[in-house]
Amino acid sequence: MAQHASAKKCIRQTAKHNEHNKYYAKTTRNAIRAIRNTTDKSAAEASAPKVYSMIDRLAKTNVIHKNKAANLKSGIAVYINKLAK
């Protein structure tokens, strides 16, 4: 158990940051899942920029790795391009 005030504060901050990161990561995963479950190309194309932005924000704050972000965005683009018009 932490003894110093600074260590206790660090534990509180870490817990808060973990909760924050978990929320945004889960929200982004749900948005990706929503795009991959749709069969309407126009709807997927309309929501893609918002999801790309969410992924970029996660990568910028190091919640996910930048290469993972690139792979996710690429996979979404491939899926959207394969959808029938």
Image (tube, grey):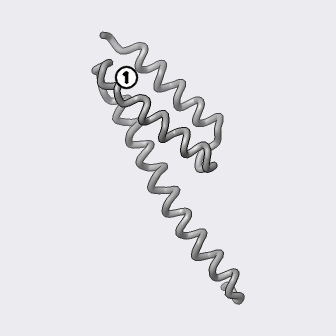
Residue 76 coordinates in the image, percent (x, y): 46, 26
- Number of numbered labels in the structure image: 1
Seen from this angle, which residue lies furthest top? 85
Whether residue 71 sits left or right of residue 42 in the image: it is right
Is 64 left, or right, of 27 in this rendering? right
In the image: residue 38, left or right of residue 65: left
Quadrant in the picture for the N terminus = bottom right
In the rendered image, the vertical position of residue 61 relative to residue 52, given as above or below: below
Q: Residue at x 52, y 39 (%)?
A: 55
Furthest-bottom residue in this view: 3
Where is residue 84? Give x, y as percent.
Answer: 32, 11
Q: Position of residue 10 (x, y in %)?
A: 65, 75
In the rendered view, tell whether residue 31 sits above or below residue 22.
Answer: above
**Residue at horizontal 38%, vertical 39%?**
31
Tag 1 secondary structure: helix
Q: Is residue 71 above or below residue 23?
A: above
Residue where numbered disc 1 is placed? 45
Query: Three-letter amino acid code at disc 1?
Result: Glu
- The vertical placement of 49 against 15, above or below, is above
| Rendering quarter of residue 79 | top left
Residue located 58% across and 29% down the image: 71
The local crowd at label 1, few if under 14, some if 14 to 19, many if 20 or more residues have their Cα within 10 Å, is some
Q: On the rendered image, what quadrant is the C terminus found in?
A: top left
